[in-house]
Image: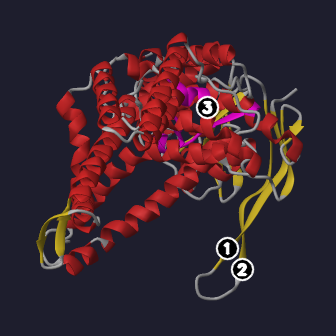
Amino acid sequence: MSIIRASRLGFDYIKYNDESEDAEKVKAISDISFEIEKGDFIAVLGHNGSGKSTLAKHINALLVPTSGTMWIDGVNTAEEDELWKVRQKAGMVFQNPDNQIIGTVVDEDVAFGPENLGISTEDIWSRVDEALGKVGMLGFRDRSPNRLSGGQKQRVAIAGVVAMRPECIVLDEPTAMLDPNGRREVLEVIRELNKKEGVTVILITHYMEEVIFADRVFVMDSGEIALEGTPREIFSKVDELKKLRLTVPQVTELAHELRKAGVEIPEGILTIDELVDALCG
Amino acid sequence: MGEITLGQYYPTNSILHRLDPRVKFLGTLVYVVSLFLVRGPFGYAFCGAVLLVLIFLSKVPFLYVLRSLKPILFIMIITMAFNVFLTPGTILWRWGFLKITEEGIRMAVKMGIRLVFLVTGSSIMTLTTTPNSLTDGMESLFGFLRIFHVPVHEIAMMMSIALRFIPILTEETDKIRKAQIARGADFETGGFIKRMRAMIPLLVPLFVSAFRRANDLAMAMEARCYHGGSGRTRMKPLRYERRDVVAYAAMAAFLAICIVFSVTGL
């Protein structure tokens, strides 16, 4: 059974103008259907305002669809009785690390989720140790989060979600506020969680480089899924991506231009090594 | 414990630091009550001796403890002056409507000693307890107020979140301040009114950002299944150790001795 299933999902919100009392109905996402299998690594791409964050909040039941249905592990997110079950199954990591850390000490913050689930003290300790170990922050457990780097804070935030033992983790632009080092740290942790622990990952981003590792990529535009496929399939559509105001990685673009100029190389080159092989092989 | 720059907390490792925050809170309460029970010189001497022992046990430098008296110096002088000049009784000295009485001097000295002991005594608590564990202790001690529908857990949660965000917002204030100075804002010159006005371009962005952060944090808390205090367990629950029991016994003995001093008037 698929872990996440969306059927004709739609979300409208009402926007009020400052001066007049006109209420305007805005479609943030409309008529989205998809299925995600357990253990998948899904990347969602899109420029600002494409509806990707709205979609993310539906997976965690922070938003409930105005039309259509969303199921997480067979549970309908619109059912209020199941709300906490859904949020435990689908953890969420946000963009700003400062605004999602609640504890004044690292291990107390990681414990926040398990504490809310009402788990016994001994279990909380073992889960916190385990979660901090998985993100490589065990040595920082007694520190104040304010003294950590951006990448470290974001790893603590991920540990806070991992400690709740979710089936899937939704990350809403987790690297947008980080420097290149922090970004690499966080992405490594996410990939390890997906590969070693088999956690389903939904990574929302606008960095093209980050989607190369995904099993499948959704490209969103004006509230709809405009393109869907493996990273290779997506990146072979350079012109379409440009129309959606997304830039492809430099190597892919170079390969694309070379192909257009008549060099015989395959479409959808993702890494420098691949391009070297294609040109010299 | 984490590094917390806020408040008076003096990080070292003493027996008082390790005590349960509830013990320290109740102990402070008992001490304050006792200060108002004792009347005679021996009683005050006893309270003073206990205070010295506590300062010694806390391993906090003596002068550091005394620093906590600074902010109340002004209040203390005023209180003592009122007592000296306005207490009726045997007149020692008179000038116009001002008069100094024997009872007045006695009262002023008493008040001064009480205030000094009271502030020093309660600052021993804040010096040896992190704001966070103090919050935890209060949540547990005032838990009974839930019967009267006081949102005890929520208040404690608000306090600990405030503690977490104070350094972040301080940093942000500094950033906004520099940004506004770069655009020609002047925070340093002019009179009181002008300076207060200059704060507006600082406070408006700060408030906007604080609200945005609050919104984000609320969402992050909900995403992590936060639904209030009911059904919540703790990673570090407060548990009484043997030393806490001993401290309670010492507290009871202290209170009993103070009552004896109070009754005999020594």
Question: Disc 3 or 2, which lies upstream in sequence?
Answer: 2
Mark 3 to mark 1 CA distance (whole Å): 34 Å
Q: Residues within 10 Å of mark 1 (few under 14, many from 20)?
A: few
Asked whether the residues under the numbered discs 2 and 1 touch, taking CB atoms below 8 Å apart as contact, a structural biologist would say yes
Quarter of the figure with residue A28: bottom right
Chain containing mark 3: A
The residue furthest front is B90
Q: Residues within 10 Å of mark 3 (few under 14, many from 20)?
A: many
Q: Relative to residue B62, is residue A48 drawn left or right?
A: right
Q: How many marks?
A: 3
Q: Is residue A106 magenta?
A: yes
Q: Nearer the viewer, residue B260 or B212?
A: B260
Quarter of the figure with residue A22: bottom right
Q: Which residues are magenta?
A: A88-111
At a point 62% along the width and 81% down the height, the residue shown is A17
Q: Position of residue B49 (x, y in %)?
A: 29, 26
Q: Which residue is mark 2?
A: A23
Q: Secondary structure at mark 2?
A: strand
Mark 2 to mark 1 CA distance (whole Å): 6 Å
Q: Position of residue A206 (x, y in %)?
A: 52, 45
Q: Looking at numbered disc 3 in the image, what kind of residue is underneath it?
A: Phe
Q: Is residue B211 above or below residue A77?
A: below
Q: Relative to residue A206, is residue A121 drawn left or right?
A: right
| Colouring scheme, one of rainbow, by chain, secondary structure, one colour | secondary structure
Image depth: mark 3 or mark 1 in front: 3
Q: Position of residue B79 (x, y in %)?
A: 27, 60
Q: Residues within 10 Å of mark 2 (few under 14, many from 20)?
A: few
Chain containing mark 1: A
Q: Looking at numbered disc 2 in the image, what kind of residue is underneath it?
A: Ala
Q: Which residue is mark 3?
A: A112
Quadrant that contains the N terminus of chain A: top right
